[in-house]
Image (cartoon, coloured by chain):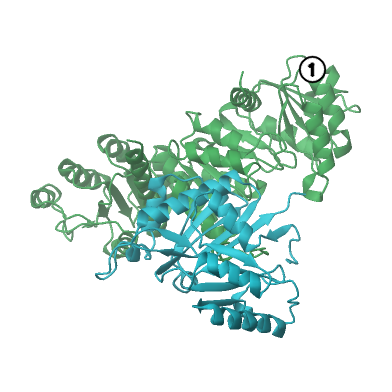
Amino acid sequence: MNTTNKTASAIHTILNTKSLAVVGASANRDKWGYMFIENIIAGGYEGELYGVNPREKEILGVKIFSSVKDLPDSVDTLIVCVPVNSVVDVINQAKQKRVKGIILITSGYREVGNNAMENDILKEIKGSEIMIVGPNIAGLNHLPNKFNPNVTKVFNTKGPMSIISQSGSVSAIIAEWAEDDGVGFNSLINLGNQIDLCESDFINYFSKDETTKSILLYIEGPKEPSRFLETLREIPVIKPIVVYKPGKTEQGFKTALSHTASIAGDDKIFSSACQQFGLVRAFDLESFYDYGKYFCLADIPEGNKVMVISSSGGLASILVDEIIQYGFELPQIPLQAVQELNKSLALPGSNFNNNPVDMPSFLPDNYYNAFKIVNKYDFADAYVILLADPVPGIEQIMPKIKEECKKPIVVVYIGGGSAGKLGTHEMIKQGIPVYPTPERAVRSLAKALWYSNFRRAFSDEQS
Amino acid sequence: MNSLNPNLIHLPEPRAALLLSKYNIAYPAHALAENLEGLFIAAEKIGYPLVLKVVSDQVVHKSDLGGVILNINDDDALASSYQILLNNLEKHSIDTKNIQVMVCRQEKPGWEFVVGVTRDDLFGPTLLFGLGGIYVELFNDFALRVCPLNRKEVFTMIEETKASKILNGFRGEPSLDIDSIVDLMLNLSILVVEDSTIKEIDLNPVRVYRNGCIALDARVIVEKQV
């Protein structure tokens, strides 16, 4: 087995484990050794679960063994949260048990200047099958396996994005938004100090994972720049990677002796590299999530023509500003389509002559009918449906619209009250990216167009 | 020489020029001298007009200290320029005993660009192209790419800048030899990928003509392997 396959197989084993032990299990509710067991159970994990602690027999109904050596042979993955001085001994025992993966929670390594103890771990696993996530992490989540060994929270909503993060807080925030929104996520990986498995391993893994449609990467600095670069030359064109990296203000000192280094600041290089490799760059947490949501739900537009169907003239003006500002066009509605819209909808106070179609209606069927007519003439690359009032039941006709539409659809639902909240949630579950403001929707669509252009330029270059 | 990172070394210009020549990057004909006699021998070999530049690890920003003298057209001017150069340095309390100077052929005038590299922590060697001299900062007109690069990528990189209009022949001016600067950039990209000790390089300016281009100055920063 080559290294890549070995790595992918180790990651697969860890995430999909059916037999797991928490080493450092605790009966004290304030200890992480307790919280892991609690969250794994609360998440509905269906595999075998054990604990290791020499002083306990049972915690939360989970059988506790006095050492790793005593665990059943079926155990292939360990969550290790013992004190830093005991880690090497645990790994040594794990090696004898033929354990495949270790989620190493324990901190007190590189982050406090203790590099030597990381090297001790690497020496211990050398030549063995064991691969390690961490150390110094809050855990991870893999929802297809209902696997929540993460102290921050239990998540239940499975969805098409995977999050890879160097910060446990950032990943938790994104995961929480994804869950609240109804998008959900597939996996959440906290990288920690990356002594063994690193960002490139996980990017490669999720690039081949069919349940992952977009990868969200929060990165401060890669473990191995050269491998990261190799990964970037291959993956972004296959699967969208949304990246957020702090440091856009470039504080912190630089030792630039040359002109080149002083004008080509880190952030400018990062920006250029994103352009070069097709990384979708987010500049803040909100767009980090928004872009990830777009790419995991909707297709990318093939051109810049946007057709807008709106329930509000006022909000449509705001939307149009954004659309133009981001370089989109609003194509004219063909005359025949205008006539058809007037005839079939016959709504007083509406204006079907221009794009956006302005349609003050609370009835979902009117949106469906309007969509059907414009869709028939097929003159746009993407649709934005702007609901600036409650349109109860819109979520019931949306699957039909989605089914008939061959172009990406983005919905803005704002001012919809409780009908809006329900509709938003339901439409997202149907796979429509719904945003709460015109700005967020258009910004996301614009990134999708940018990515689409990148992909086209890339394939032109290959041919 | 650098209080922030003592492992960074500024290569003396003749060594920088030698490194560039190994990668087929053109540099003006030059020779080193330590006294007037040496200067005359060098001048005879290279031919006028000449440029004098101080070579010393005490002097990084040589122009700021009067360590560069241009437009030297004959032996008399060479002798007086040498004296002026030494005086300039002494004014800045630089010990001129045994100080070396580089005698360079003065190249024809032309449009000037900057080509550089810096080694980024995240992406490794990164190439820069922009308008030469101080203008790159003034107009913020430059493009960056992570190395290694192919010919097409270097072309699109140049096309991204406003400076590319000059290369393509701005306002009726003849177009310049873009291929030659693309070659230079590709060669520099190979150099930094092959030599991992290189931390930063400035070729500023690089003069581009209708036929060919040449780097007129090179600042090369290498990281001492510890």
Where is residue A453 drawn, in percent x and y? Answer: 34, 47
Q: Which chain is cyan?
A: B
Could you say which is closer to the camera, residue A339 or residue B17? B17
Please say whether residue A52 is visible from this viewpoint: no
Q: Quadrant of residue B161?
A: bottom left
What count of labels does the image hold?
1
Q: Is residue A77 visible?
A: yes
Residue A312 % position (x, y): 28, 60
Assess disc 1: are there few (<14), some (14-19) or many (≥20) residues with their C-alpha within 10 Å of its C-alpha.
Answer: some
Label 1: chain?
A
Is B140 placed left or right of B10 in the picture?
A: left
Indicate the position of residue A246 as horizontal and vertical percent values. Answer: 60, 56
Please state, as top left, top right, bottom left or bottom right, where the C terminus of chain A lies in the image.
top left
Circle 1 sits on which residue?
A: A97
**Which residue does the image show at 41% across and 51% down from the upper left?**
B154
Residue B77 drawn above or below residue B162: below
Amino acid type for the residue under numbered disc 1: Lys
As drawn, the chain in green is A
